[in-house]
């Protein structure tokens, strides 16, 4: 544990550097840390991916099950996103029911997937009103060094592209599983990019110590056509209109870079 | 449980009129009252279209449990909660994940406006009850909670006004009601302090080009300005009333 | 916040006044505070009513849904009453799962409705053993200045009298909603009257500061025929037989007055 | 799960005899033991008809968490809890809303009898376990918990005796068992301190005229008197036994 | 409450005595305290038994209900074991959701029943995949003076041998209860024996004060043929291989003695 | 949800080869890494067959809430937790009763190895996440958590190695994988400190004669010995690597 004085000295240093357009770890203001991506890491899952952004590490696994649709959408599959801030990942994470932060993380990733129509939920109906496929996207944060949203959203995208579904036939109202697998029907590739505001400057991909000094944070999710599909301002501070528009511009550019890491060709 | 509404074919007719008769750039009728609750240190009530929302504030008061107090500022707590009968399908009284997320973003929308540094180690509690919901409740909740904070006498940099803009039938419109939100293409809720030019809440879901997004934000800001005027008028009327009462 | 000393002085004053047959707010011992009633205040609810008794304010909304009956009563509708002591309503109410007091409040109101047969539950069966109407009565306390039970019971009665049900047809085992509404079938009009004992005197409709000094409290619910249908003693103290019988007599009279506020004609 | 009992056509036959052979004004057989548990500071066990109920008391002891202690008296806590196998359909071990309400009214039925002012800032815990339920458990629970308090040596103004009266087949009867409670027209549980003439619990559900209610309360009071005698005898027998043991 | 010093003195005494092959209450190292067994004590339960080992007292009740089988075992009955450490039973037991100790207790008893095939679950299928009998075994600890597992397992065995099931017929897919009862189909008689290690000696049936000084504890469940069907090491310390084998030998012998208390003839 | 596997007719073929190609007395392939997490004070990762398990240790640190601290030693806390996607049917993230029992026995398997008396009033937290499960997770969890404790620099009497033996198709085998566990006749998980000859976890379910049990324990101990060697090698390799890094 670092002493509170050391922490404050470092925070001051981070803020002053950002004012000068620099960062403590040598990055440009709009640089991501090194990103590593690995898919298919959990064989029991229908799809999985591990993303490392610097020292932040997130594992996402997907599972598919049969279940009842929502009453008002009887012919559509169901998407469920959860996030677990495992107590391994940070001394500040406690075991127990999901915290406000875990819920927000899951819901921001969920909105990116849902609003961009990443999954073709209309193709996941088995028996209208009775049985549809439920796609579970479970985010598992293994090490927290800042910017959990971007890492989680990227891992979720990679895991869903990597997800395989079992085949089935419906015989006399009964669903029978057939041998073989088919890929999950996918229509879009949303990517979340988070920017933090420190001393009125915007920086991309804040790491933990930057998150501790930032005024506010904004996550912008753009899809493969460059449209915005989800956005979330967070943190104690605020943004001006200029800052928001600048953030959107940067986010779109960075999203294109990140998307290439996941979607080949 | 209600007789199911038929999905409307069109949300905007050929004369640019919306289902409830509004123009594209028009707010729903808004009615605000402040000081409506007796026990709360501050309170306010808003009707925005069919939304009916009550906000109450307690504090600043001793934070408890103590280890959650913050040495150099007040701790803002916020609960956004929906009454079971506020929506068509009865809602369980247990807070949902949606309610817990909204509690957080509403808190962070209000915090930039509050001089939290004036009251170290205390807690300021904001309780929001949605009595009837019709789309845009988080924005109306911010608008009304900001007045409840003022009514509690908590020093603020500015009132926070909030309003959404969005896209329906391919057109940008202001202040979406429930059907427009559900059937529409995008929703951009925004909280703004016009005096400080500070955006304190910004979310979005749906699909917008960058240009559309910029227009939607500008449209929402215009809505916020109008709401801000309403907020100020309400506060002023209240103080005049109190003053008259005192002087009588 | 008042100082503890001021509170004790006031409490002593309240108790002494009651001994003299007077009350701090000028009421007679058997007077209610001013009662305001408004119905249909929440359009999304199937029925609703707001009751103010002095500064105590309660909102009740009803919802109707289809669901399974109790296994031992397959042909009867289901009544469910909950109470939420919203944290708005008092500095002593905490957000979270229902407290003992909230549970007691809901159950006392529930018993009045159930035992007086206010709702004709036998008319709420759609498909015996499978589908019946569930009537939710949700009590929402908005400001607590004492005597929550009477305010809640009165608002519940008014909301239920104000409740409309959707129409339906059963076609080939499927329930279809038809246009139009019909009133909830209602058979009785129970009214709860609460008395507190202070210095061996009975007072009607205790407000908060009286509740803080009272020895005990008794709620007596009588129906439209003047029969008793529910009763609940509460509080740290006790009643004598004489006091109970006196309370019953007063409660019946006051109930008739209150009933007229809700049931016209 | 049981073979379903047929609903009895009549709860009282033409000779005024009830289903279990009792007269209208007759208590079920009662068996009481005190000091039945080794660890509890006080304990007692009651069988009343088919009811089997165990009560244990711990305290007075340091209240914890401390902020819940009361400066000028002991804090009484009470838990009424049913074993999963105590009823025909297995009951979930999680306390139901009914169990939570009964915990409160039982606590308030006992509190007037306890000299809580002798033990400021402490806590006295009363735990009641319903091992088998057959109607009237709250009353039997008060009767037995009152003895467990005495067994724990906690000073009391009086023992509290409890008993219900009610109406079945149009007649007033004493001490309803389960079937009579379910099929009957009204139930009036009452807790009474005969020495102090203090009614400490009174509930009612069903339908009674005011006259019937008055008769029912009087009938229940007579029941309480008999139970009170039994309570005193049991306590006396216990002390004699202890005394003999000590003197041996 | 005893003073901490008195407790430590007593603990030292217990440990020293055990080294000499003696116990504070005069028992031999491999002696049980006096055991009392009573069956059929709760008439509402389908089966029940109360066991007292010294001052430890446990009540077990069984209930039988119809319900859905596990999806992967569609033609087998379901066994559910819970344990409630009632707050009556010890000043250290708190009311609330089950503690780690309560869960371990239930699961160790469960394994003995399940692995020995005490209940013929294959005979409890009513309608494959839809309706089977669920056997609830609810352990209720009434006084805790050590060795809860052996008392609970013995009471569970006795209660299950004492359990009667209702008869039924299936008519056109509906299950109808018939008059009369039949005993629960039973195939084995597992008995749990717990040994504690104190100062490197093994003792059988530790009472509470011995449990407070023991290094570790081992429960060995053997069936009627002398086979081991479940085992659980518990506590902060460890066993050597020799100690484990010695414990197994003793446990088998003691189990035979205990079994005779429950299974006649 | 997976294409259902057919139940294998035989778990061991006529040449004494198991479904995954192993001999009766053979461990699954094991891969261990230590120091894999950045924030935890110590961490390790193991793959044993298809099991993938991560362990992290925080502490010794101030125990909180304070009344749970122990005056003369550190309080070991342990959570064994399965990821929702670690098994064929998605597992709810809420800890099951099985996970809570395993958390306890794993803690008690590790505690005899830790010099808890060196750190009175502190807390040492061990968090185990099962990322993929394939039988024998509790043993692999103990093996890896023991390395995470060492990686955190917590003084230990010995590393704890854990391994199961069991009976399938009537034969005793080492280190059962999931199918063998489910279809087999018995499973005996064991944790052992070979240096101290101390068995710190021992469970069993199934059916074994006393002689079979003795053989199974001996077989599991041999497995533990091999795993213990692997643990030591991994630790040594780590220190050599650190040393080289420092000396460069």
Image (cartoon, coloured by chain):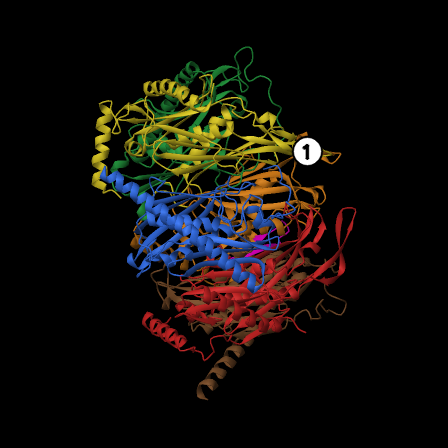
Chain colours: A orange, B brown, C red, D blue, E yellow, F green
As drawn, A170 above or below F169? below
In terms of depth relative to the viewer, which is nearer, B222 or C253?
C253
As drawn, A215 above or below A175? below
In terms of depth relative to the viewer, which is nearer, F239 or E102?
E102
User: Does residue F95 show up magenta in the picture?
Assistant: no
Q: Which residue is mark 1?
A: A167
Q: Callout 1: helix, strand or loop?
A: strand
Magenta part, dominant SS: strand
- Let me know if residue D210 appears in the view: yes
Range of residues picked out in magenta: A221-233
The quadrant in which the N terminus of chain B is found is bottom right
As drawn, D19 above or below F142? below
In the rendered image, residue A67, in percent from the top left (x then y), is placed at: 64, 41
Image quarter of residue E239: top left
Image quarter of residue B181: bottom right
Q: Chain of mark 1?
A: A
Most distant residue in the right direction: C171
In terms of depth relative to the viewer, which is nearer, D65 or E34?
E34
Q: Is residue C220 left or right of residue A120?
A: left
Most distant residue in the top direction: F15
In the rendered image, residue C118, in percent from the top left (x then y), is placed at: 64, 61
């Amino acid at each position: 544990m670092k002493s509170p004085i050391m922490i404050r000295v470092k925070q001051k240093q981070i803020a002053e550097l950002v004012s000068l357009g620099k960062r403590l770890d040598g990055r440009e203001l709009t640089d991501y840390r090194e990103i590593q991506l690995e898919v298919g890491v959990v064989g029991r899952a229908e799809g999985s991916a591990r993303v490392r952004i610097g020292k932040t590490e997130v594992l996402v696994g997907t599972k598919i099950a049969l279940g009842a649709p929502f009453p008002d959408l009887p012919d559509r599959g169901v998407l469920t996103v959860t996030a677990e801030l495992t107590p391994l990942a940070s001394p500040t994470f406690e075991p127990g029911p999901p915290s406000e932060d875990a819920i927000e993380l899951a819901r921001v990733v969920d909105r990116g997937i849902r609003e961009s129509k990443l999954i073709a939920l209309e193709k996941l109906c088995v028996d209208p009103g009775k049985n549809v496929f439920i796609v579970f996207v479970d985010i598992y944060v293994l090490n927290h060094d800042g910017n959990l949203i971007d890492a989680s959203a990227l891992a979720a995208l990679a895991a869903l592209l990597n997800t395989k579904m079992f085949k089935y036939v419906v015989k006399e109202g009964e669903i029978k599983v057939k041998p073989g697998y088919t890929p999950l029907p996918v229509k879009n590739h949303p990517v979340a990019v988070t920017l933090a505001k420190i001393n009125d400057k915007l920086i991309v991909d804040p790491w933990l110590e930057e998150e501790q000094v930032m005024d506010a944070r904004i996550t912008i999710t753009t899809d493969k056509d460059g449209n915005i599909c989800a956005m979330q301002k967070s943190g104690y501070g605020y943004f001006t209109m200029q800052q928001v528009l600048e953030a959107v511009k940067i986010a779109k550019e960075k999203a294109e870079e990140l998307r290439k890491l996941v979607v080949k060709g | 449980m209600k007789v199911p509404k038929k999905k409307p074919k069109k949300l905007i007719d050929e004369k640019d009129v919306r289902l409830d008769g509004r123009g594209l750039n028009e707010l729903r009728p808004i009615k605000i009252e402040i000081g409506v609750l007796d026990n709360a240190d501050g309170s306010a009530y808003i009707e925005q279209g069919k939304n009916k929302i009550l906000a109450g504030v307690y504090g600043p008061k001793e934070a408890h449990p103590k280890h959650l107090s913050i040495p150099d500022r007040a701790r803002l707590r916020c609960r956004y909660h929906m009454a079971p009968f506020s929506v068509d399908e009865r809602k369980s009284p247990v807070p949902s994940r949606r309610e817990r997320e909204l509690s957080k973003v509403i808190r962070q929308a209000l915090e930039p406006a509050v001089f939290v540094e004036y009251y170290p180690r205390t807690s300021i509690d904001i309780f929001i009850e949605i009595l009837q919901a019709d789309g845009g409740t988080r924005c109306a909740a911010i608008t009304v909670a900001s007045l409840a904070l003022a009514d509690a006498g908590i020093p603020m940099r500015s009132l926070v006004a909030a309003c959404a803009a969005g896209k329906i039938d391919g057109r940008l419109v202001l202040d979406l009601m429930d059907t427009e939100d559900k059937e529409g293409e995008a929703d951009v809720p925004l909280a703004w302090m016009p005096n400080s030019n500070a955006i304190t809440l910004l979310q979005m879901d749906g699909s917008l080009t960058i240009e559309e997004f910029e227009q939607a934000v500008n449209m929402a800001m215009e809505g916020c300005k109008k709401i801000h005027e309403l907020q100020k008028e309400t506060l002023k009327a209240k103080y005049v009333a109190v003053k008259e009462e005192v002087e009588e």
